[in-house]
Image: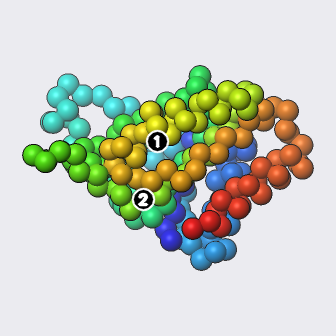
Protein backbone atom coordinates (compact mmCIF):
# COMPACT_ATOMS: atom_id res chain seq x y z
CA UNK A 1 0.00 0.00 0.00
CA UNK A 2 1.24 3.47 -0.89
CA UNK A 3 0.60 6.09 1.78
CA UNK A 4 0.95 9.83 1.41
CA UNK A 5 1.13 11.74 4.69
CA UNK A 6 0.45 15.46 4.44
CA UNK A 7 1.37 17.38 7.57
CA UNK A 8 0.90 21.03 8.42
CA UNK A 9 2.56 22.66 11.39
CA UNK A 10 4.72 25.79 11.18
CA UNK A 11 7.26 24.59 13.76
CA UNK A 12 9.86 22.10 12.57
CA UNK A 13 9.34 19.95 15.68
CA UNK A 14 6.48 18.87 17.88
CA UNK A 15 3.75 16.30 18.30
CA UNK A 16 2.20 16.82 14.85
CA UNK A 17 5.50 15.77 13.28
CA UNK A 18 5.86 12.89 15.75
CA UNK A 19 2.45 11.53 14.72
CA UNK A 20 3.44 11.66 11.03
CA UNK A 21 6.78 9.94 11.65
CA UNK A 22 5.18 7.27 13.86
CA UNK A 23 2.55 6.49 11.24
CA UNK A 24 5.25 6.30 8.55
CA UNK A 25 7.50 3.99 10.56
CA UNK A 26 4.64 1.66 11.45
CA UNK A 27 3.26 1.53 7.91
CA UNK A 28 6.72 0.74 6.52
CA UNK A 29 7.10 -2.11 9.02
CA UNK A 30 3.94 -3.63 7.56
CA UNK A 31 5.41 -3.46 4.06
CA UNK A 32 3.91 -0.16 2.94
CA UNK A 33 5.64 2.58 1.00
CA UNK A 34 5.24 5.99 2.61
CA UNK A 35 6.03 9.55 1.63
CA UNK A 36 5.56 12.65 3.76
CA UNK A 37 4.81 16.12 2.44
CA UNK A 38 5.36 18.97 4.89
CA UNK A 39 3.22 21.85 3.67
CA UNK A 40 5.49 24.32 5.50
CA UNK A 41 8.52 23.15 3.50
CA UNK A 42 9.27 26.30 1.51
CA UNK A 43 10.25 24.25 -1.55
CA UNK A 44 6.77 22.69 -1.70
CA UNK A 45 4.56 25.65 -0.79
CA UNK A 46 1.84 26.61 -3.21
CA UNK A 47 0.47 30.14 -3.47
CA UNK A 48 -2.97 30.63 -1.99
CA UNK A 49 -5.75 30.08 -4.48
CA UNK A 50 -6.46 33.27 -6.39
CA UNK A 51 -8.17 33.79 -9.72
CA UNK A 52 -10.28 36.14 -11.79
CA UNK A 53 -11.48 33.42 -14.16
CA UNK A 54 -11.41 29.89 -12.73
CA UNK A 55 -11.34 28.32 -16.21
CA UNK A 56 -8.25 30.21 -17.36
CA UNK A 57 -6.40 31.10 -14.14
CA UNK A 58 -6.36 27.71 -12.35
CA UNK A 59 -4.50 25.56 -14.84
CA UNK A 60 -1.61 23.23 -14.14
CA UNK A 61 1.55 24.44 -12.45
CA UNK A 62 4.68 22.50 -11.60
CA UNK A 63 3.72 22.39 -7.91
CA UNK A 64 0.11 21.39 -8.59
CA UNK A 65 1.19 18.61 -10.95
CA UNK A 66 3.67 17.35 -8.32
CA UNK A 67 0.98 17.32 -5.59
CA UNK A 68 -1.66 15.70 -7.79
CA UNK A 69 0.81 13.03 -8.95
CA UNK A 70 1.50 12.19 -5.28
CA UNK A 71 -2.23 12.01 -4.55
CA UNK A 72 -2.77 9.66 -7.51
CA UNK A 73 0.19 7.50 -6.43
CA UNK A 74 -1.27 7.00 -2.95
CA UNK A 75 -3.80 4.38 -1.91
CA UNK A 76 -4.10 6.09 1.46
CA UNK A 77 -4.00 9.80 2.29
CA UNK A 78 -3.19 10.78 5.87
CA UNK A 79 -3.59 14.38 7.00
CA UNK A 80 -1.92 15.49 10.24
CA UNK A 81 -2.41 18.98 11.61
CA UNK A 82 -3.44 21.06 14.59
CA UNK A 83 -6.93 22.48 14.90
CA UNK A 84 -6.89 26.26 15.14
CA UNK A 85 -10.05 28.36 15.43
CA UNK A 86 -12.07 25.17 14.77
CA UNK A 87 -10.33 24.43 11.49
CA UNK A 88 -7.10 23.16 10.01
CA UNK A 89 -4.32 25.67 9.31
CA UNK A 90 -4.92 27.84 6.24
CA UNK A 91 -2.03 26.18 4.43
CA UNK A 92 -3.79 22.79 4.72
CA UNK A 93 -7.10 24.21 3.51
CA UNK A 94 -5.25 25.78 0.58
CA UNK A 95 -3.74 22.36 -0.25
CA UNK A 96 -7.29 21.07 -0.77
CA UNK A 97 -8.46 24.19 -2.64
CA UNK A 98 -5.55 24.14 -5.09
CA UNK A 99 -5.14 20.40 -5.68
CA UNK A 100 -8.50 18.62 -5.29
CA UNK A 101 -10.01 20.39 -8.27
CA UNK A 102 -12.70 19.69 -10.83
CA UNK A 103 -11.20 17.50 -13.53
CA UNK A 104 -8.85 15.88 -11.03
CA UNK A 105 -10.85 14.88 -7.94
CA UNK A 106 -14.28 15.00 -9.61
CA UNK A 107 -15.95 16.07 -12.80
CA UNK A 108 -19.40 16.94 -14.03
CA UNK A 109 -20.95 15.19 -17.00
CA UNK A 110 -24.41 15.40 -18.54
CA UNK A 111 -25.33 12.56 -16.16
CA UNK A 112 -24.10 14.45 -13.08
CA UNK A 113 -21.14 14.28 -10.72
CA UNK A 114 -18.42 11.68 -11.34
CA UNK A 115 -16.15 10.93 -8.37
CA UNK A 116 -12.56 10.36 -9.53
CA UNK A 117 -10.82 9.31 -6.30
CA UNK A 118 -13.05 6.45 -5.13
CA UNK A 119 -10.05 4.19 -4.59
CA UNK A 120 -8.50 6.46 -1.90
CA UNK A 121 -8.71 5.91 1.85
CA UNK A 122 -8.33 8.96 4.09
CA UNK A 123 -7.31 9.43 7.72
CA UNK A 124 -7.10 12.64 9.72
CA UNK A 125 -5.01 13.07 12.89
CA UNK A 126 -5.74 16.32 14.69
CA UNK A 127 -3.90 17.88 17.59
CA UNK A 128 -5.64 20.32 19.91
CA UNK A 129 -5.45 21.91 23.33
CA UNK A 130 -9.19 22.14 23.88
CA UNK A 131 -11.42 19.70 25.75
CA UNK A 132 -12.33 16.37 24.15
CA UNK A 133 -16.07 17.12 24.00
CA UNK A 134 -15.43 20.07 21.71
CA UNK A 135 -13.67 17.90 19.14
CA UNK A 136 -16.32 15.18 19.29
CA UNK A 137 -18.59 17.94 17.96
CA UNK A 138 -15.98 19.20 15.48
CA UNK A 139 -15.00 15.80 14.02
CA UNK A 140 -18.45 15.02 12.53
CA UNK A 141 -18.47 18.51 11.04
CA UNK A 142 -15.06 17.79 9.48
CA UNK A 143 -16.19 14.35 8.28
CA UNK A 144 -19.53 15.33 6.75
CA UNK A 145 -19.51 19.05 6.01
CA UNK A 146 -16.04 20.49 5.48
CA UNK A 147 -12.87 18.80 4.21
CA UNK A 148 -13.98 15.22 4.79
CA UNK A 149 -17.43 15.94 3.43
CA UNK A 150 -15.90 17.34 0.26
CA UNK A 151 -13.45 14.48 -0.09
CA UNK A 152 -16.16 11.86 0.25
CA UNK A 153 -19.11 13.57 -1.44
CA UNK A 154 -17.23 15.02 -4.40
CA UNK A 155 -14.12 12.91 -4.93
CA UNK A 156 -15.46 9.62 -3.56
CA UNK A 157 -12.54 9.10 -1.16
CA UNK A 158 -13.45 7.00 1.87
CA UNK A 159 -12.88 8.65 5.26
CA UNK A 160 -11.77 5.74 7.46
CA UNK A 161 -10.87 7.67 10.61
CA UNK A 162 -10.65 11.09 12.21
CA UNK A 163 -8.58 10.94 15.38
CA UNK A 164 -8.33 14.00 17.63
CA UNK A 165 -5.68 14.21 20.34
CA UNK A 166 -7.03 16.76 22.80
CA UNK A 167 -5.85 18.65 25.89
CA UNK A 168 -2.28 18.29 24.68
CA UNK A 169 -1.12 21.11 26.94
CA UNK A 170 -1.96 18.80 29.87
CA UNK A 171 -0.38 15.73 28.25
CA UNK A 172 3.21 16.81 27.87
CA UNK A 173 4.71 13.86 29.72
CA UNK A 174 6.15 10.89 27.86
CA UNK A 175 3.67 8.21 29.05
CA UNK A 176 0.67 10.28 27.96
CA UNK A 177 2.19 11.03 24.55
CA UNK A 178 3.29 7.41 24.11
CA UNK A 179 -0.28 6.25 24.74
CA UNK A 180 -1.45 8.53 21.92
CA UNK A 181 1.31 7.32 19.60
CA UNK A 182 0.26 3.73 20.32
CA UNK A 183 -3.17 4.64 18.94
CA UNK A 184 -1.45 5.99 15.80
CA UNK A 185 0.46 2.71 15.49
CA UNK A 186 -2.72 0.62 15.84
CA UNK A 187 -4.43 2.62 13.10
CA UNK A 188 -1.40 2.36 10.83
CA UNK A 189 -1.56 -1.45 11.05
CA UNK A 190 -5.20 -1.53 9.96
CA UNK A 191 -5.93 -2.26 6.34
Q: Which mark is residue 135?
A: none
Q: Residue at x 83, y 53 (%)?
A: 178
In the image as oriented, which residue stretches furthest toward the top?
A: 85
Q: Is 11 or 6 nearer to us in this picture? A: 6
The one of 118 and 172 positioned closer to us in this rendering: 118
Picture coordinates of residue 150, whole percent (x, y): 39, 40
Looking at marks 2 and 1 on the same chain, the residue that comes earlier in the sequence is marked by 2
Q: For the residues marked 2 and 1, what is the alpha-carbon distance in whole angstroms?
A: 12 Å
Total labels: the figure holds 2
Q: Is residue 56 left or right of residue 120?
A: left
Residue 7, placed above or below residue 83: below
> Can residue 174 be spotted in the picture?
yes
At numbered mark 2, what does the secondary structure look like: helix, strand or loop?
A: loop
The residue wearing badge 2 is: 120
- Point 47% across, 58% down: residue: 121
Crowd rating for badge 2 (residues with CA inside 10 Å; few <14, some 14–19, many 20+): many
The x, y position of residue 124, in whole percent, is 57, 46
Amino acid sequence: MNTLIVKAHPASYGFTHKIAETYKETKEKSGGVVEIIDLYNKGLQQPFLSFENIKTDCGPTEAKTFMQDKIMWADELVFVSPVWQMGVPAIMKNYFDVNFTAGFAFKYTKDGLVQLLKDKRVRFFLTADGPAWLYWIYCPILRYLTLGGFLHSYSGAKIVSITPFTKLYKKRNDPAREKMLNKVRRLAWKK
